[in-house]
Amino acid sequence: MTPQEFNLLLKEFTLAAESGNGERFARCFTEDGIYHDYIYGAHHGRAEIAHMMQHLFHRDAGPDYRWEMFDPVCAGDMAYAWSLSSFSSRIEQFKDRFVVIDGMSRFRLRDGLIAEYWESVNGGVAMTQLGVAPDRMQKVFKRWSGWLRARPETQAYLNRPRALDGRAPTILPQEENP
């Protein structure tokens, strides 16, 4: 995918997310696409992705939900973008509390669509804005830590020797890349 094509997909992705229309949002993904949400977990296929966006996320985030992507980078089938998002909570315990989130998004692309999506955000900042109790935050952070440590890519990373221990670096500096 070209950077220009990715920018168009990214625009539709965020507009669809803001709209709350789950089917529109899911059309940004391949039929077998996966959306890894840091709150709601992984959702496989368009039907699950549509349900997550429309019936979970927009159930909890108010109609003022916004999501903008900045500084997109696309290299073939991988892309990244920095984002800001904001909303007022609809969750009764946190009703009308306003949250702004800073995040990074990673996209695996296929056939002009998103095959897999991951996000990385500081959920602690969001929970603090909501007023989540520290003991509840700790339970969530432990769950997130477990997910991170269990991922196959994390396990592979932890099992590799450090570069300082004689392994060649995984990523070479720009001037050394062919």
Image (cartoon, helix red, strand yellow):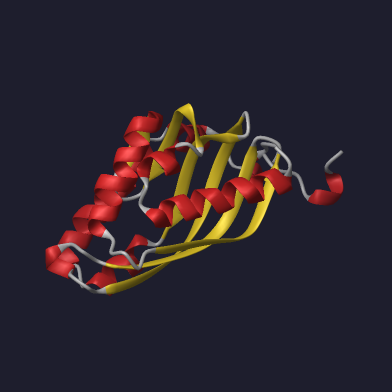
Residue 38 makes an appearance in the image: yes
Q: Nearer the viewer, residue 35 or 155?
A: 35
Residue extending farthest left = 93
Q: Nearer the viewer, residue 146 or 86?
A: 86
The quadrant of the image that shows the C terminus is top right
> Image height check: is 130 above or below 165?
below
Q: Is residue 163 left or right of residue 42?
A: right
Residue 148 makes an appearance in the image: no
Q: Nearer the viewer, residue 137 or 77?
A: 77
Residue 175 position in % (x across, y down):
86, 50
Residue 105 position in % (x across, y down):
52, 51
Q: Nearer the viewer, residue 89 or 162?
A: 89
- What residue is rendered at 35% in x and 39% in y? 50
Q: Quadrant of residue 75?
A: top right
> Image height check: is 119 above or below 111?
below
Residue 176 position in % (x across, y down):
85, 45
Q: Quadrant of residue 46?
A: top left
- What residue is rendered at 22% in x and 61% in y? 137
- What residue is rendered at 33% in x and 67% in y? 126
Q: How many marks?
A: 0
Residue 7 position in % (x across, y down):
65, 51
